[in-house]
Amino acid sequence: MTISRRGFIGGVVGGAVAAGTVDAATVEHFDGYPGRYGLLHDTTLCVGCRSCEVACKQVNDLPPYPGQPVGDMSVYESERRTTDTCLTVVNRYREAEGTTPAVYRKLQCMHCNEPCCAAVCPVRAFEKTPEGPVLYHADVCMGCRYCVMACPYYALAYEYDNPITPRVMRCTMCYPRIKEGLQPGCAEACPMGAITFGRRDELIRVARERIRKNPERYVDHVFGEHEFGGTSWLVLAGVEFSELDLHDGVTHESLPAIGTSYLSVVPLVITIYPGLLAGFHAFTKRKEQLAREEERAAVARALEKAGAETQQKLAQATEKAKKDQEKAVKQAVAKALADQAKGGE
Amino acid sequence: MSHSTMTADSAAEGRGGLLTPFNLITGVILAGGAAILVLRFVKGLAATTNLTHTNPWGLWIGFDVMSGVALAAGGFVTSSAVYLFGMKEYKPVVRPAILTGFLGYFLVVLGLLADLGRPWRLPYPFIKQAGPTSPLFEVALCVAIYLTVLFIESTPAALEWLGLKWWRKVVGSMTIALTVLGLILSTMHQSTLGAMYMITPTKLHPLWYSAHIPVHFFVSAVAAGLAMVIVEGMISHRAFHHQVQITDEHFQRINIGLAKGAAVALATYFAVKVVGLAMEDEWHLLLTGWGGWYLVEMLGFVLLPCLLFAMAYRERRVLLARLAAVITVIGVMLNRFNVTFVVFNWDGAPGERYVPHWMEVWVTVAFITFAVVAFRVIANRMPIMYEHPDFKGMH
């Protein structure tokens, strides 16, 4: 499991980096906790009796179906999904067409090896236990419902009618019962032996063995062994898995690996932007400064030119004034002398 | 209080006391919204929303959070243009854009508080237990910090109004740092909002799902932000015309410049989307029903406004730019609605399609009304639409 407890800051950076990059640490491959539990649903054995649904409600203290007695096959007329009070439901696929018998599949949390719910939770309310079950801790949950939105199996439900303490509701693989050494409620209740509880790797061997012994009965594939990184619940079927609304032929890469890969870019934004933007800012400043300097130089040149012209004009004017003055003095002197000469006569 | 704010105040109050049609209508909308929110916390989300186990995110996430963040991008786009890239002629629109951004992000938080199952635990990712592998954790961290940045970036108007010159100077000296921080945080969370959908390749229609969806979200947010600055200016310059100091010619030049920027942003967005189609070889999907819906979004709400913006720029037609801006805003909302609840669960999802409950719509309208009223109250008092005479030319 890639989600471990980390320090806060170390977690932010480390989590982001670990999400989508290949480095010396991530080339190592973790196959999951050894010896963890799982369940195998053999849809070729399931008759749709819904004993598992009833048992699930009993062991989880959930309200029974109002007015819908078990055995009432009319529930199969519409497709159902898990809700906050039905953590598992059985659906009927491929209604009897000629000789083909109806196929029933049980829906519940698949307890992924790398759960989307755990990867997207902003408060790490989900925990992949070494025993296999994925647990939900309501005591930290904010109720953002990103887990409900992210789950590829539509297995999570929310208590929308609880105004104060709503919880995400989903199969727990009967974790408390497993700890006590008991089987999950549904596996114990199944009268057809369609649900087998055990160590996951052992269940895969059992499933393969069934396919080998009855190749005409089964599609040669164990759903959940590798799909999106694998699940704890495994499914065997006699029809194509796509007809059971299961993702057929999808990647073996886990969805969290795909879905959180972008976070590896985030530290780059933080580290590269300040320098880059400082550069842009410096360019702008420099351009402004150059423009200012050019302007100043141009003004200085203009002033200088204007100054020189003024000087010249001033000099000319002074010269002229001097000459005018001299002329005036000369004239005055001449006039005075003439007056004197006249007066002397 | 200086002279110009006095006139602004008296102008606002001089329009007929409290019982104006504007006040009555907003009062009814806000009171209704408050009543619905009370119901939501008494009866639960089931009583006020149409959310289902299959569609856990509806209008309050699709509009209030996803669209709200994109439409509030004008703050970081204009402040970066003016303070980092030296495009000073756009300075008159920075303050209204920052205020719009702050109110927009405030709405995001309000929307979250309404939508979260246990909203009082909103700080849990920071104080109780961090989930660093979650894109939502990163968004929450960025939005929390960016809301603070926007708050500080909005304070100069309040400090000028209060006449606190020393504090105003301190905040002014932080302008560049805040702008850089705003750009970093916006790049991160605008794109990470898109990255939140990367974990749902089986649920989101392949035409909308992409390994590049973070880039789609970021680029479209830049376009949305620019468009919102034009739309907001179109309304506020009419509503606060008595405060506006810049000439009509200057305002027109700003709008034409914004139109040019928006045309480039939309063209980039369109190109990135087409490259995505080609890289993932999804051309054949265009001929399906969902493909038609995709073409409506891409041609009608991206390419069309892009061309209109380009024409508006070429022919210097502000009206055309405003039309394009309105189409862009609707287009970005359409995109966020699509990925959140329309084309999400397009195939094989159990249960009925999600259609927003009227109470969800009412609360959303009430939040927008709240932002409009807040903008009006602030702009009527503080120097948002004009430069305070005592603080002219400051950052």
Image (cartoon, helix red, strand yellow):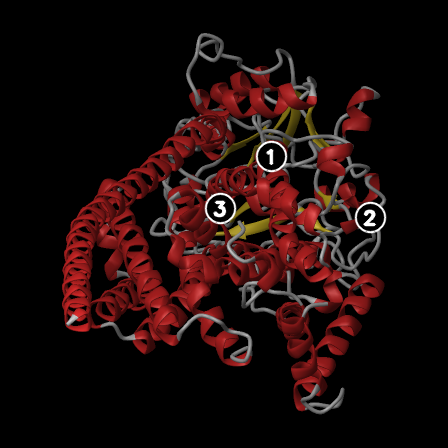
Q: Label 1's element? A: loop
Amino acid type indicated by mark 2: Leu
Label 1 crowd bin: few (<14), some (14–19), many (20+), radius 10 Å: many
Q: Label 3's element? A: helix
Query: Label 3 marks which chain's residue?
Result: B
Q: CA distance from mark 2 to mark 1?
A: 20 Å
**In the image, which is nearer the foreground, mark 3 or mark 1?**
3
Is the N terminus of chain A in the top left, top right, bottom left or bottom right quadrant? top right
Residue at the disc numbered 3: B190
Q: CA distance from mark 3 to mark 2?
A: 41 Å
Are the numbered discs 3 and 1 placed on the same chain, yes or no? no
* Residue A214, position as x, y percentages in the image: 44, 26
Contact (Cβ within 8 Å) of mark 3 with mark 2: no
Residue at the disc numbered 2: A62
Q: CA distance from mark 3 to mark 1?
A: 32 Å
Is the residue B217 above or below the residue B93 in the image?
above
Residue at the disc numbered 1: A110
Are the numbered discs 3 and 2 placed on the same chain, yes or no? no
Q: Residue at x 23, y 65 (%)?
A: B310
**In the image, which is nearer the foreground, mark 3 or mark 2?**
3
